[in-house]
Image (tube, helix red, strand yellow):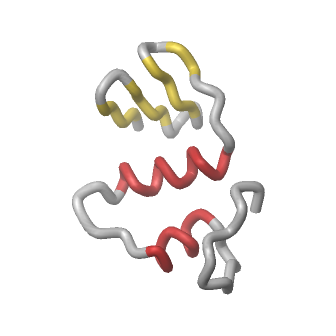
Amino acid sequence: MIFRFGDCEIDSGRYELRRAGAPVAIEPKVLDLLLHLVRERDRLVTKRELLDAVWPGCTSPRAPSPER
């Protein structure tokens, strides 16, 4: 599925972010986070849900580092 916003698009099938048609270098967890937010764009997403979806197994109430 392709999500478009402004001059950007996220292609979940190719696991790629593009801006003005050109691929953008992005860390995998950042792309996971963006994908989750655009998939759930019509509702409030809680911090706990984000942690569970993007950093499964994280038990800390503080935000994990991007490489986790």
Quarter of the image for residue 37 reads bottom left
Where residue 63 appears, x then y in whole percent?
Answer: 62, 71
Determine whether 59 is above or below 29 in the image: below
Q: Quadrant of the C terminus?
A: bottom right
> Residue at 59% across / 48% down in the picture?
30
Q: Is residue 12 left or right of residue 27?
A: left
> Residue at 29% across / 69% down in the picture?
44
Q: Is residue 8 left or right of residue 11?
A: left
Q: Quadrant of the N terminus?
A: top left
Quarter of the image for residue 20 reads top left
Where residue 43 appears, x then y in whole percent?
Answer: 25, 65
Determine whether 60 is above or below 12 in the image: below
Where residue 16 appears, x then y in whole percent?
Answer: 56, 31
Determine whether 9 is above or below 55 in the image: above
> Residue at 65% across / 73% down in the picture?
56
Where residue 59 appears, x then y in whole percent?
Answer: 67, 85
Q: Nearer the viewer, residue 10 or 1?
A: 10
> Residue at 58% across / 36% down in the picture?
15
